[in-house]
Image (cartoon, rainbow, N blue to C red):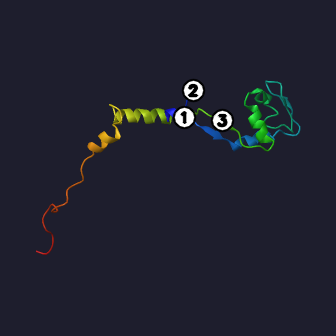
C-alpha cells in the first residue's frame, strides 16, 4: 500500500471518472429569470454547469476534462477522499493492535501455527439404546 498508493497528501489511487460528462449539461433557469454568479458569469435560461463556473477552465487539469467533453477518454485523477484516508488509518490501527511487535515473518508464523487436533478416540460416552 505504501509503495503503490502513497502520495504526499495521503494514500490514494487514480480513478477514471465518467461523471465529468455532466459538466456540459444545461441547468434549469426559469425562462423569465436572469442573474449573475459572484464570479461575474451570467445565469440565463441556456446556461450550463460550466458556463456559470468559468473558473474551472483555469484549473491546470481542465484540458483533461475538456478533451473528455469533446469525445475523448474519461479523465483520470487521484482523489484524496476523507473516507478512504479514514479506512487506511483504521486498518493501520487495527494491525497495530493485532500485531504490537510487528507482523511475524512467514517462517516464524508457520513455526508458531497451532497443530491440528490429533485423530483418535472421540471424547464422551456412547450414546444409544439403554
Q: Distance between the residues labelled 1 and 2?
A: 11 Å
Dot 1 lies on which element? helix
Q: Nearer the viewer, residue 89 or 1?
A: 1
- Would you place residue 83 above or below residue 125 in this image? above
Residues under numbered marks 1 and 2 in contact, where contact means CB atoms less than 8 Å apart? no
Q: How far apart are marks 3 and 2 (CA)?
A: 14 Å
- Would you place residue 121 above or below residue 110 in this image? below
Q: Which of marks 3 and 2 is nearer the N terminus?
A: 2
Report crowding for label 3: few under 14, some 14 to 19, many 20 or more residues within 10 A (C-alpha). Answer: some
Residue identifier under label 3: 77
Res 124 seen here: yes
Image side of residue 110 versus residue 66, left or right: left
Toward which corner of the image does residue 20 lie, by quadrant?
top right
The x, y position of residue 12, in whole percent, is: 57, 34
> Which label belongs to residue 5?
1
Residue in the picture at 57% in, 26% down: 9
Looking at the rendering, in which quadrant would you find the C terminus? bottom left
Which residue is situated farthest in the top direction here?
39
Q: How far apart are marks 1 and 3 (CA)?
A: 13 Å
Q: Earlier in the sequence, mark 1 or mark 3?
A: 1
Residue in the picture at 15% in, 69% down: 127
Residue identifier under label 2: 9
The x, y position of residue 33, in whole percent, is: 86, 35
Which residue is situated farthest in the right direction here?
32
Toward which corner of the image does residue 37 lie, by quadrant?
top right
The x, y position of residue 16, in whole percent, is: 66, 41
Image side of residue 33 versus residue 82, left or right: right
Residue in the picture at 35% in, 33% down: 97
Number of numbered callouts drawn: 3
Q: Nearer the viewer, residue 37 or 8?
A: 8
Dot 2 lies on which element? loop
Amino acid at each position: 500500500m505504501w509503495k503503490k498508493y502513497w502520495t504526499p497528501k495521503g494514500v490514494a489511487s487514480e480513478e477514471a471518472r465518467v461523471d465529468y460528462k455532466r459538466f456540459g449539461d444545461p441547468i434549469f433557469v426559469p425562462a423569465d429569470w436572469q442573474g449573475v454568479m459572484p464570479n461575474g458569469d451570467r445565469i440565463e435560461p441556456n446556461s450550463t454547469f460550466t458556463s456559470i463556473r468559468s473558473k474551472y477552465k483555469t484549473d491546470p487539469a481542465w484540458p483533461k476534462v475538456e478533451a473528455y467533453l469533446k469525445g475523448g477518454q474519461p479523465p483520470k485523477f487521484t482523489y484524496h477522499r476523507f473516507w478512504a484516508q479514514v479506512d487506511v488509518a483504521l486498518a493501520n490501527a487495527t494491525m497495530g493492535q493485532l500485531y504490537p511487535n510487528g507482523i511475524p515473518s512467514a517462517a516464524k508464523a508457520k513455526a508458531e501455527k497451532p497443530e491440528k487436533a490429533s485423530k483418535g478416540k472421540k471424547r464422551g460416552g456412547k450414546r444409544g439404546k439403554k
